[in-house]
Amino acid sequence: MELEIREIGDENLRFFISGVTPAFVNSIRRTILQEVPVMAVDEVEFAENDSVMGDEVIAHRLGQMPLTTPDGYLLPSECDCREGRCSNCSVDLTLEAEGPTVARAGDMDSSDPDVAPVQPDAPVVRLEEGQKVKLTAIVRLGFGEDHANWQPAIASYKYLPVIEIDQDAREDWDECVDACPKNILEVEDGELVVTDREECTLCKACAEACPDAIEVSGDPSKFIFKIESTGCMSPERILKKSIEVLKDKCDQFSEGVERL
């Protein structure tokens, strides 16, 4: 197996992975979406809400806001407190605002500064003159398989495109160039060239327009993998945690087989 990093940023990671099967790559994708624990608002306690938005609407909005996720917190099911309300397994975000104003995510005070909204400018609720809101949002670790609130990222993969061009098939390439929706085909010195193979979506529009000259396929042993984090943690950290989860599962399976 080989892995080559193609792009890395605060919220995006793109890499090539080869020498593996689609099932293996998909297991990484599914683990990222479902089994990497992150922090999210789990419950909201309202002391006051005079706004036009119902309690449940505000609670839903808070639950969908990505939060930074440091290491060290326990899942509620693993904590000795058994109530999910101690400092080892939960964080409180408190909001108290009075109109006229737009209360935003950054207006909430966190009991742990390391757990905070990724987008502080995100609006929570608009308050008119005389309206107030006072609430406590309880943040806990959770999994994407239980609710999308705890999904840490979007993860996807595709076969590495293979674009074969018969340069002797024709002299006029305009029809082929115009057919590509990603604009990755150009003519250089009378020959058709691919300027960015990674951007190919395997739609085969160019092959349909020029079937005598172009063949498009995907290499089933090479993949382009993309991770777009919600901002809760870096994409490389998400990838590493997903690999740790898969490794633990394989170890448990191996131990089970040995006991047979």
Image: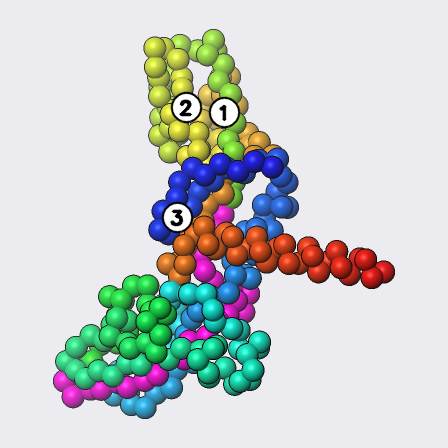
| 95 left or right of 175 in image | left
Q: Residues within 10 Å of mark 3 (few under 14, many from 20)?
A: some
Q: Is residue 82 above or below residue 244?
A: below
Cβ atoms under marks 2 and 3 closer than 8 Å: no
Q: Nearer the viewer, residue 123 or 177?
A: 123
Which residue, given by chain and number where applicable, does mark 3 sit on? Answer: 12
Q: Are marks 1 and 2 in contact (CB under 8 Å)?
A: yes
Q: Label 1: which residue?
A: 163
Quadrant assignment, res 248:
bottom right
Task: Tell me the amino acid under the disc marked 2.
Answer: Val
Furthest-bottom residue in view? 47
Q: Residue at x 35, y 30 (%)?
A: 183
Q: Earlier in the sequence, mark 1 or mark 3?
A: 3
Could you tell me which residue is drawn at 36 percent across and 70 percent down?
115
Q: Position of residue 135 (x, y in %)?
A: 32, 84
Circle 2 — which element?
A: strand
Tag 3 or tag 2, which sits nearer the N-term?
3
Eyeballing the image, is 140 above or below 195? Answer: below
Q: Is residue 130 magenta?
A: yes
> Which residue in the protein does label 2 denote?
194
Quarter of the image with the C terminus is bottom right
Camera-side mark, 2 or 3: 3
The reply to whether discs 1 and 3 touch (Cβ–Cβ < 8 Å) is no
- Identified by mark 3, the residue type is Asn
> Which residue occupies 29% across, 63% down?
119
**Real-space CA distance between mark 1 and mark 3, rounded to the nearest whole angstrom:** 26 Å
SS for tag 3?
strand
Bounds of the magenta segment: 128-156
Residue 220 appears in view: no
Query: Where residue 252 sits: x, y (%)?
Result: 71, 60
Find the distance from the CA under tag 1 to the CA under tag 2. Answer: 8 Å
User: How many numbered marks appear?
Assistant: 3
